[in-house]
Structure formats: structure tokens, C-alpha cells
Image: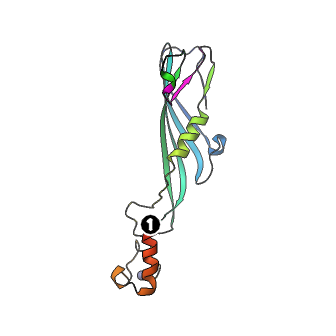
Amino acid sequence: MRIKISGLENGTYEYDFEADIDKIDLTEPLFGKYSTNVVLNKFDDQIILEASTAVGANFICDRCGIEFKETVKSKYKMIYLLRSIEGAEEEINIIYLSPDTPIIDISKEVRDYMILSIPMKRLCKEDCKGLCVKCGTDLNKKQCDHNDDKVDDRWKVLVELKNKLNIN
Ligand SMILES: [Zn+2]
Ligand SMILES: [Zn+2]
């Protein structure tokens, strides 16, 4: 994802990139192509770049175990300074460029921010009811005869352990 900046006049520019995710070293659970939209604002001494990326992902629901697809989105903003400014080095999203830099490559940032955007908790839907601990029925699909106050003693230990470990 290379953007030519040499000779670029001040102003706002937009770019779209699309390619297979392995081109930017992304792998499972992501799949297919990434699409990245870049809005670039060029000024005399800095470039402000905002990149939004979307990639499809295959997840397994933490509660009911079904596979589902979701689009993971990530966004970041980067400032490229074409001269050094006192104090600016404390900011994370600032990169210094020599004023004659011909091209900027945003592949690494797009990749890093996408990885940070992959959710830790994966639910097929916010209110997924999960599986019955006793008979394994998918409670999203149908009810079974078991509910918490009827759980017998053999299972109670497991249910308590499960709650303690917070595996839902
Ligand atoms: Zn689920
Ligand atoms: Zn049941």
C-alpha cells in the first residue's frame, strides 16, 4: 500500500486499496481480501493520514460453538511530519519523514491496527444463549427441560466451576 507523496500539492486526496490479506501478512481467523480507504491531507510541513480497513473473519462463538462470519473493522490516524517539531516525539502516531521522501508505505500500520481490532470475545450475537450444560441443546434454537434450579448435584459442581472460570 504505497502512496506517492513526492510532488503532491497541498490538499485532500483519497485512495482505495484492495488485495489478498496475505499481502500484508494477515492470516486466520481473517480471510479473503482487505479493503482499505485512505484519506490523506497534505500540508506544507505535514501529512495527516486516516486509514479505515475492513476484513472478513471466521469466528467460533464462545458460547454455542457455531461458526459465524463477521467483518472486522479498524481505523487509525497517522501524522507524518516533514520537519521535526519540539516535543512531538512523545506522540505515538507521528512519523518523521525527510522532506524529499518519495513514497510512504502504510502496509505495516494497516496490518498492526487490524490485528489489534480482532475481538477477544467472540459471540455469534450479543445475547447468544449458549448450550444447555446438561444436554447440550443449542438454547438459541430450542428450549430443553433443564434450567439452573433443576441441575442435579453431579452437574452443579461443573456448573459452579464453569461460572467461576467464566467460560460462557
Ligand atoms: Zn452463539
Ligand atoms: Zn438441556
Q: Is residue 33 visible?
A: yes
* Image vertical order of residue 69 relative to residue 25, above or below: below
| Magenta-drawn segment | 90-101
Local packing at callout 1 (Cα closer than 10 Å; few below 14, some 14-19, many 20+) is few
Q: Quadrant of ligand 2?
A: bottom left
Q: Quadrant of the N terminus?
A: top right
Rendered location of residue 66, percent (x, y)? 51, 67
Q: Residue at x 51, y 57 (%)?
A: 69
Q: Residue at x 66, y 45 (%)?
A: 22
Rendered location of residue 92, percent (x, y)? 50, 31
* Image vertical order of residue 82 relative to residue 62, above or below: above
Q: Residue at x 47, y 57 (%)?
A: 121
* Residue ID for mark 1: 166
Q: Main secondary structure of the magenta part?
A: loop
Rendered location of residue 136, percent (x, y)? 47, 78
Residue 97 belongs to the span the image colors magenta: yes
Q: Residue at x 50, y 21 (%)?
A: 47
